[in-house]
Amino acid sequence: MNGIQKSAHRSEVKCFPLPAKPFIINHKFIPSGRIKLDGDKSITHRALILSALSCGKTTLNNFPIHDDSLATLNALSALGVKILRRRGVVSVCGAGRQGLETPAGPIFVDNSGTTLRLLLGVLAGTSFKTKVVAGEYLSTRPMSRVNAPLRLMGAAITARVKDHEEYAPIIIKGGKLKGIVYHPKIASAQVKSAILLAGLFAKGKTQVFERLSTRDHTERMLKLFGADIIVTHNRITLNPDQKLVSPLEICIPGDISSAAFFMVLGAIIPKAKIIIENSGLNPSRSGIIKVLKRMQARIKVVVYKSAAKAVNFEPCGELTVSSSQLKGVVVSPGEIPFIIDELPILMVAACFAQGRTMIKGVGELRVKETDRINSMVFNLKKMGADIRVHRVGGEENIIIQGQGRLYGSELHSFGDHRTAMSMVVAALAAKGESRLDDISCVSKSFPGFLKMLKSLS
């Protein structure tokens, strides 16, 4: 059974891990019923951080208990922020921008890339030195993309260097920051957010110009806390003079990245019908709905109407997905930032579609928790998929010739939660039995995944 436990070391909270053993998938069923999603992972990180930096107490409802959200919670606790937990509700007593304390030792962020990158933005504004240590998988992910702009703002940062790239562990000492104008070379909401969070501590305005738009949860959350932030097309301008004030309560909408697994499951299994309650519908995150609809997936979207500010800072609603005859499509590079987390499960959908699907500009998948291009191509080929990687110049494209079917096989998670859940969905729709080497990694973002699947049988 999933749950949480308190560690004796620094009062950290941890998920009870799922068993690290082969998972056999041979139970064929027609998924039907309603599910309600836990809070969105991306929104939760930002809600915790801005609650900690604001004045007042903030209550976070529908708080998701998984490894990533707990990594941010534990990091803030290590910095002296008082956080109370009670079931699905977390209360954060804001310390204000100047109220963070020197941690007793290194801060461990597990394998949460969002925790690490956003936390660096916060630590850039402190007066003390902090060492941040990451887990095995996160320690292989590149960090120059966030370290470089923070150095330009005045932070002193040292990191492990290999082949001209920087990796965790990272030591950062904040200082008197100055606002900058920055044009990120890589479309990354994490980089943008780290710069904006550091900008809260800077002297003068900070501006970020995005070549390709990325998810805007940070901008929305800053507005909710009263920050002076202006978003005009591809330019975000933050004036740090405005004090952050708690909105008192935040209702975290369900995670659309989690919903994506059930959208595809409902679309590819005959006679299926799944209703997903409380799904986030942020336009910068709902690209998966647009792409699946282009593939002729039968998805009905009903947007909730609410006058409560704590709810409608992020749109959310109900999704109804029914069995569909999917068609292949072309996904453009400009769409990738809006579906980056959903690309693995989209590849599964493409295997069950008729015709060719081409997903262009997917290179950023190489530097996720694992190389998701490799993990998905490896597994889907074993299941009989016609899938290949096509390189044009410096760009990588995924090409899938849909055959409407897959076959059971020996599958590997590669320690990656999204790969593992994608392969479970693929195996449930495949002919024959499949064995996944390790399902425990889903605790990173969705420890209740298997229980929710079972509820639809």
Image (cartoon, helix red, strand yellow):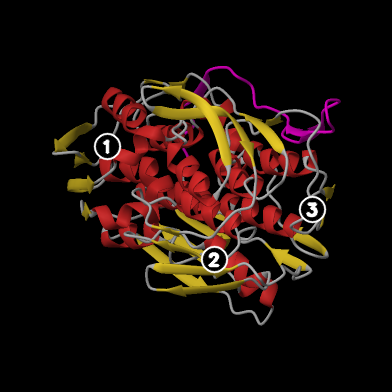
Residue type highlighted by circle 1: Arg
- The relative height of residue 359 versus residue 384 in the rendered view (above or below) is below
Q: CA distance from mark 1 to mark 3?
A: 43 Å
Q: Which residue is mark 2?
A: 219
Q: CA distance from mark 1 to mark 2?
A: 41 Å
Mark 2 residue element: helix
Compare marks 1 and 3 and give the one earlier in the sequence. Answer: 3
Q: Is residue 362 in sight in this rendering?
A: yes
- The relative height of residue 284 versus residue 401 in the rendered view (above or below) is below
| Residue 90, numbered label | 3
Q: Pinpoint residue 307: horizontal percent, then vertical percent.
A: 66, 82
Describe residue 53's horizontal placement relative to residue 405 as left or right.
Answer: right
Compare marks 2 and 3 and give the one earlier in the sequence. Answer: 3
What span is in magenta?
A: 1-29
Q: Pinpoint residue 360: horizontal percent, then vertical percent.
A: 22, 47
Query: Dot 1: few (<14), some (14–19), or many (≥20) neighbours within 10 Å?
Result: some
Residue type highlighted by circle 3: Val
Residue type highlighted by circle 2: Glu
- The relative height of residue 308 versus residue 46 in the rendered view (above or below) is below
Q: From the image, state whether disc 2 or disc 3 is nearer to you.
A: 2
Q: From the image, state whether disc 1 or disc 3 is nearer to you.
A: 3
- Asked whether residue 43 is drawn in magenta, I would say no
